Image (cartoon, helix red, strand yellow):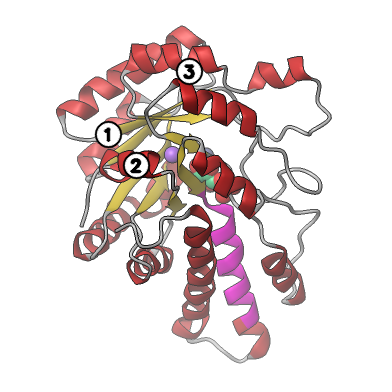
Amino acid sequence: MLVTGSDILVPARAGKYGVGAFNTNNMEITEAIIHTAEKLRSPVIVQMSEGAIKYGGQDLANIVKDLATRATVPVALHLDHGSSYANALNAIRMGFTSVMIDASHHSFDDNVNETRRVVEAAHALGVSVESELGRLGGIEEHVVVDEKDAFLTDPEEAVRFIELTGTDYLAIAIGTSHGAYKGKGRPYIDQARIAKIGAMTSIPLVAHGSSGVPAEIVQRFRDAGGEIGDAAGIADEDLHEACQHGIAKVNVDTDLRLASTVGIREALKVNPKEFDPRKIFGPARDVMAQVIEHKLRVLGSVGKA
Ligand code: G3H
Ligand code: 13P
Ligand code: NA
Ligand code: ZN
């Protein structure tokens, strides 16, 4: 069933498990997400960025809504990194049940004001809201404390921000970054900061940049002819631990991008004569489903729906 983000995330925060929030850009990605969630009896969030809306628009939103409505588990359709009030409201008009307003690059006061007016409008329309405080960006373990603090979410500020805005869930900067290159070795994630913010707040917290960039997928990508540098993501144990301390929404895009490309490359490598799209996109969907299944198990949402 199609539900709001809060319907899914409030129980997750209380139950100390994470909900996967996977980015979609087409039918196969959407099916991999929702069908895997159904198989594992897991609630799930399907999110579209503004780029995804530009690419797939109402056609793609309708595919997600249709699959979500028919799904036997709770599914929310979420706007990822909404950049303005107008874009957040446009997503609601398109049928999204959850929207992010990302004004984290503005001053604290401007972030509060922009977030507050999205919250007001979204709530009037029965839609829940994610906002963000702090700056994402890969932060290496050796960066000095002062420099880290300049980027990462300040716990006291988070409390004030939540009070002032009425945001339903909050993305916090904890050292993760978007993409396949999150740092050398085991990329840094500030567990102490998560625990502190978690203890001082009660709303669900959101971790962006949560792809694991699994070594096995990276290897298959290379073996099938792909070129990729020193890729690294967030370790499974680190994500699992973060979900014990308040992280309830876990954003994943890169892992599905890699998985789908692995499926396509392998299919074409095995049979260079292939040109039936179903024999190309089908394997992509299968590899994505495997990666999603692994993630849902790590987050602990399996069996919660
Ligand atoms: O946070 C970024 C997501 O990975 C979406 O990326 O804007 O290229 O669709 P995109
Ligand atoms: P990844 O690049 O780690 O998949 O993060 C995606 C994300 O945060 C989308 O908002
Ligand atoms: Na988001
Ligand atoms: Zn993000």
- Please name whichever residue, 284 or 163, is drawn nearer the observer in this view of the structure: 163
**What is the three-letter code of the residue carrying label 1?**
Ser
Can the viewer see residue 79 in this picture? no
> x and y percent of residue 88 in the render?
32, 32
**Residue bearing the label numbered 3:** 158
Q: Are marks 1 and 2 in contact (CB under 8 Å)?
A: yes
Question: Which residue occupies 75% across, 54% down?
Answer: 231
Q: Identify the amino acid type marked 3.
A: Ala
Give the residue at mark 2: 9
Instruction: Measuring from the top left, give residue 118's x and y in whole percent.
Output: 29, 23
Residue 72 magenta-drawn? Answer: no
Residue most extreme to the right: 142
Q: Amino acid at mark 2?
A: Leu
Most frequent secondary structure within the magenta stretch: helix
At label 1, counting other C-alpha atoms closer than 10 Å, the crowd grade (few under 14, some 14-19, many 20 or more) is many
Label 3, secondary structure: give it.
helix
User: Magenta span covers which residues?
Assistant: 252-266
Q: Is residue 275 visible?
A: yes
Q: Earlier in the sequence, mark 2 or mark 3?
A: 2
Q: Is residue 293 left or right of residue 164?
A: right
The mark lying in front, picked from 1 and 3, is: 3
